[in-house]
Image: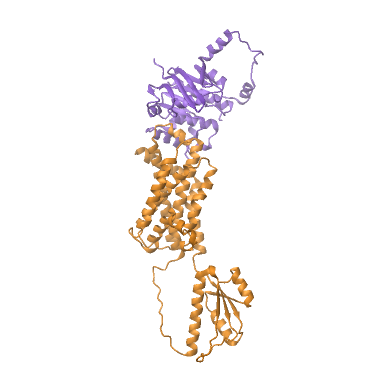
Amino acid sequence: MRQVFGYTLMLLRAYTRDFTALFFGFFFPLIFMGLFGILNFGAFGHVAVGIVDEASNADSQAFHAGLAEIETLQLSSGTSDAQLESLRKGDRDIVLVIPADFKIAPARQGAAVPTLTLYANQGRGEQVAVGSAILMQVIDQMSFAITQTAPVVAMKREEVAGRNLKYVDFLTPGIVGMTIMQLGVASVMFSFVVDRQRGVIRRIMATPISRRNYMAAHVLERLLLAVVQVLILLAVAVFAFKVSIVGSLGLVLAIAILGSVLFLCLGFAVTGFVTTENQAPAIMQLVTLPQMFLSGVFFSRDAVPAFLKPVSDVLPLTFLNDALRQVSTAGAGIVDVGSDLIGIVVWSAITFVIAFRFFKLEA
Amino acid sequence: MPPIVSVRELRKSYGQIKAVDGVSFDVAEREVFALLGPNGAGKTTTVEILEGLREADSGTALVAGVDVRKNPSGVKERIGVQLQQSAFPENFLAQEIVDLFALFYGRRVDSLALLRAVGLEDKARQKSEKLSGGQRQRLSIAVAMVNEPQVLFLDEPTTGLDPQARRNLWELIRSIRDRGTTVFLTTHYLDEAEVLCDRVAIMDNGRIIALDSPRSLITHLLGRGFSKPVQQQQASLEDVFLDLTGHALRED
């Protein structure tokens, strides 16, 4: 035991001198968080609305001016052809055509009312939904104003404090999950492939240390590092980005350790198939890149295309991110994330078996 | 006194290639013994079997009284090794490397004293990967001594070193032998074997083709009526180089 702990401490001390590892382990995830946090990619942007005013009368201009006051809408106007072309190119989310017979007046019984035509960009469902809801609201308000009737129902809006999820709140658990994955896989793959190739492991195995103790120290070192890394990330998130962690911090850490075990196993499993230093970066990308984009690190998994959904659902990082996010943003307890934890354990078992079968300390 | 290394009919094949093909020899305590031979002669395979790193196909090998094939880890406790094509983990200071390997033997050592013994005391706080080739070899000898081994195995210790560093290392090896450790080395430098070793075994194609002291091997050859076709030069270019640069205690 003294040997394992002693070796672990010496590995950690050596790690603090490894500037590349420190950069990728500690600063890189922070840079990611800072970048995405500041850019606030997740914030709902504007809805680009193209107006085609075929009426060009006082009423249509008043309507247009009314829309211009709504911040969310980014208006532009032009001819029908030009606006529809922009819509096709993806520069507009919605194109609204104001018909020539447009007027704001009480409708006469039985007469046709002017019909606004709305062209929606199929690829931007969320923006279209928000944009058309706003348009409908504006039209309703105009109708009330003209007809002088009181609304049938009124809606009172109240902000609920605490559950007002900022993007960075959503992002933080994703970054934590991604960091655990990157470090788990990279810290195993790069160091073991290099040490194996350079004969470092051969030299150590010429001493009486058992393989079990050797492995135990390396795994322990990486688990301790993972905990420190997660704590630093969370500290920066909480203090610099005002992220609120709703659930238990202890549970977040426990899930992080469990996830770290999983990705260390995955790292050892994959390293079993890597023989040279040159292969390592490619294999690393192959394993981690799909998970970065399909497991909900930066964006909600709702954005994953339907045909990739079955894959996304079962990726190791999906379970880890989901569990971390549930606890951190929704205050979930251990029971609520039970299915995610089972997913993590199952993946750990699978990768452990592969690692046990294929990972070799010596070439 | 029984031999400290005793090898009988050792064999090891890789597919069709007989790397070690029935090798037998003894090494006496406190001698410097060399396996000499060209690359691919089977020197490293033989040494690695004795070090408990490779399994022999057949034959017996006793090292410091332990049967290597039955108890490889028992052998590892009793010997010190320097491997060919091996390296130390990165980002460790020289002194930490010594402490680390002591830990692998479950020992605590005076790492500075060990570094002093190989002339590296002033490099104790330097990363091992920043050391020069000769310094690294000396560090690896310091590391090989952490468990006070009965036999020190050195696999091509001077390959790739410049003349000063080689002579430096020879002196170190002699001082280790003088302190009571048997030294077993492999080399493909004949001059090295001649000046350093008490006995040499010449190996070729997995077999030992001659085994004696360098002096009697040479005497034997001369006894068969051998003479060099050309008059031996009184000094070699290497001697010129050493004379100009001075080999004694120069930092390499």
How many labels were placed on the picture?
Answer: 0
Whole-percent x and y of residue B65? 38, 21
What is the x, y in percent for residue B250?
Answer: 56, 28
Q: Residue furthest front?
A: A110
In this structure image, what is the colour of chain A? orange
On screen, residue A362 above or below B162:
below
Dividing the picture into quarters, in which one does residue B81 lie? Answer: top left
* Closest to the observer, A256 or B161: A256
Along the line of sight, the residue nearer the viewer: A251 or A19: A251
Residue at the (47%, 90%) spot, across then down: A148
The vertical placement of B37 against A362, above or below, is above
Where residue A292 appears, as percent x and y from the top left, is 49, 55
A98 and A300: which is toward the camera: A98
Whether residue A263 can be seen here: yes
In which quadrant will I find the N terminus of chain A? top left
- Residue extending farthest to the left is A335
Chain shown in purple: B
In the image, residue B159 above or below residue A116? above
Q: Is residue A171 above or below residue B34?
A: below
Residue A17 in sight here: no
Residue positioned most to the right: B230
Coordinates of residue B252 in the picture (x, y in percent): 56, 30
